[in-house]
Image: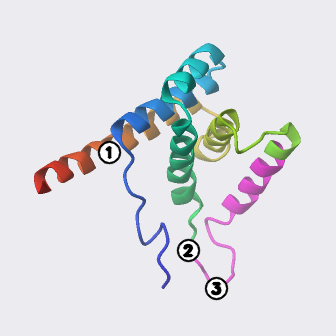
Amino acid sequence: MPENTITTPLAPMELDDVADAFAYIRAWQADDIDTACAVADVTGPELHRMLLDVAARVIIPVTAADDHDGEPCAHSFLAAALGRLLLEMLCDGVCLNSLPGAADTITRFTGNILTDDHGDVAGVLRQLEAAGMRQAMEAHSAHRTTV
């Protein structure tokens, strides 16, 4: 079987990267443009890479469906939901290669896929951030014990 992010987990992000990326995402989701711009100014061009790292960690585990010989399975709804999300983004003219575009992708995916009826997006983002921080702290601790 070829290696992919299902069989090979993504490397943990750095603690500061998780904090900065989610600070930007939460600010953007809350329409707090001043805070989002302040985070972007402090973080610099690396913020785009951080947002793409977060997007991978949010989207890949959710969209990874088992192959059931081409037959629809319990996860089949994901393909339709992702299609709706991409169409929505195309209609809104969102550029995925921009900071706001990446933050929009993460918040819309969270709202469309990870919450019921566009529920508590901010709450789910906080949970995702906490999971990223735990993973980064565990990786940092493991690295320190091996050095």
Q: Which mark is residue 98?
A: none
Instruction: Indicate which disc, 1 or 3, sits on the residue closer to the N terminus.
Output: 3
* Mark 2 lies on residue: 66
Would you say residue 120 is visible in this rendering?
no
Other residues around mark 3 within 10 Å, as few (<14) / some (14–19) / many (≥20):
few
Q: Toward the viewer: 97 or 9?
A: 97
Mark 3 residue element: loop
Q: Toward the viewer: 42 or 16?
A: 42
Inspect the image, locate mark 3, and give the three-letter code of the amino acid beneath it.
Asp
For image coordinates 83% across by 49% down, the residue present is 87
**In the rendered image, the vertical position of residue 73 relative to residue 132, given as above or below:** below
Mark 1 residue element: helix
Q: Alpha carbon of mark 1 to alpha carbon of mark 2: how far?
A: 27 Å
* Mark 3 lies on residue: 69
For image coordinates 73% across by 54% down, the residue present is 81
Residue 104: x and y in percent read 68, 36
Residue 10: x and y in percent read 42, 59
Assess whether mark 3 and mark 1 are in contact (beta carbons under 8 angstroms). Answer: no
Other residues around mark 1 within 10 Å, as few (<14) / some (14–19) / many (≥20):
many
Range drawn in magenta:
66-88
Mark 2 residue element: loop
Magenta-span inclusion, residue 76:
yes
* Mark 1 lies on residue: 136
Q: Toward the viewer: 72 or 112?
A: 112
Instruction: Indicate which disc, 1 or 2, sits on the residue closer to the N terminus.
Output: 2
Inspect the image, locate mark 1, and give the three-letter code of the amino acid beneath it.
Ala
Q: Alpha carbon of mark 2 to alpha carbon of mark 3: how far?
A: 9 Å
Inspect the image, locate mark 2, and give the three-letter code of the amino acid beneath it.
Asp
Badge nearest the viewer, 1 or 2: 1
